[in-house]
Amino acid sequence: MSRFLFVVPPLTGHVNPTVGVAAELAARGHPVAWVCPDPELVGRLAGRAAGPVFACGGAPAGERPADLRGPEALKFLWEWYLLPLAEAMAPGVRAAVEAFRPDVVVADQQAFAGGLVAERLGLPWATSATTSAEFTDPLAGLPKVRQWLDERLTALRATVGDPAGAGDPRFSPHLVLAFSTPELAGEPPGVPVSGGGGGSICWVGPSVSARPSAAGFPWEWLDDGRATVLVTLGTANAGVGGRFLEVCRSALRERADRVQGVIVDPGGTPAAREPDKDVLTVPSVPQLALLERGVGAVVCHAGHNTVCEALWHGIPLVVAPIRDDQPVVAGQVVDAGAGVRVRFGRVTAQRFGAALDSVLDDPGHRAAADRIRTAFRAAGGATAAAARLDALAREFR
């Protein structure tokens, strides 16, 4: 029996993939615990699989400018979120380690306080890579940003980790669990890839497990005679999606003879309050249950979680990346043949409609999505990830 501590940021898309892994470990008899700036979020998503949830500090609140793109957006993400998050989480992570006494720390790729604290205390740790975008080195070609980030990470390690340590805190020297497969992500250049261990990438595929469903979804509204199109921009983009959702609404209404739309609009734009027999607008959906029922296409921001959940069900996509890792993930979808990319801020109803028609009507997109679905399910998901973590713990006993 080994003890596992999951260190996660307060982001739904980063907690969800670890829920199934924790449940698998618990089913094997291993105690599990969590540390997160938002314990309530973990408790809500993990349910009975949660175990103890330790609180810690989080990044300072503040809105990110909506118009930031490219290198500026990337630097802002690091300077105003990821680095302050690591500094704020570190004391709570250390206290959780001292209280729970884990054998292995499992640190999300964006909560690298977990890896640095484990490094300082001499504990083995694994990276939970909830997006494969970092494997492509998004800072390639940006030497000044790379130098700035290296200096900041060195300073962070000096205060949180082992000052004599080396290596990128986003990638464990022991094990990197990637919740994807090369059929979608491609083979990352210059990164060791194998079945796990030695700091190599272990492709386990998506960790898709049952989760609490949003109550009150009107299942009776769905029309089996038309293809359902799910439109969602994730949980972190409610404030910037109004225009894009209206474009989607317009294009879906034009195709109402064969298509019905389900739009997730947590921000409650004015159109969300208008009754519509062809486009259902709701603040949230039971996404996995809806995908399982059958969806013709998913329209999303290319968030890694949503993309992988759609492809887990063999559903092709229209992707409209906004920022962060989303352009990389969108490129993976297009390169794999499983979808079409549109420009989030500039797409018109005509162009969006053409992309949607292509995804719905071109059998090549669905064939590619089916191919990725087969690879995802063969990779093992949460069961494979738990087995690798179990082996890592036994290796360091």
Image: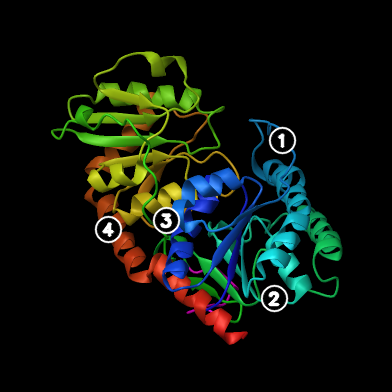
Disc number placed over residue 370 in the picture, else none = 4
Q: Residue at x 45, y 76 (%)?
A: 387
Residue 103 visible in image:
yes
Residue type highlighted by circle 3: Asp
Rendering coords of residue 231 (x, y %): 38, 34
Residue 23 picture location, percent across and down: 44, 63
Tell me which label, 2 or 1, sits earlier in the chain: 1
Circle 3 sits on which residue? 335
What is the CA distance from the residue labelled 4 to the residue labelled 2? 40 Å
Dot in front, 4 or 1: 1
- Could you give the CA–CA distance between mark 2 and mark 1, rounded to whole angstroms? 31 Å
- Marks 2 and 3, Cα distance to the nearest angstrom? 39 Å
- Check residue 190 for magenta coloring: yes
**Residue matched to label 2:** 123
Q: Secondary structure at mark 1?
A: loop
How far is mark 3 from mark 4, CA to CA? 15 Å
Q: Which residue is mark 1?
A: 61
237 horizontally vs 119: left or right: left
Instruction: Tell me the magenta residue range.
Output: 187-196
Residue at the (55%, 62%) spot, across then down:
129
Q: Nearer the viewer, mark 4 or mark 2?
A: 2
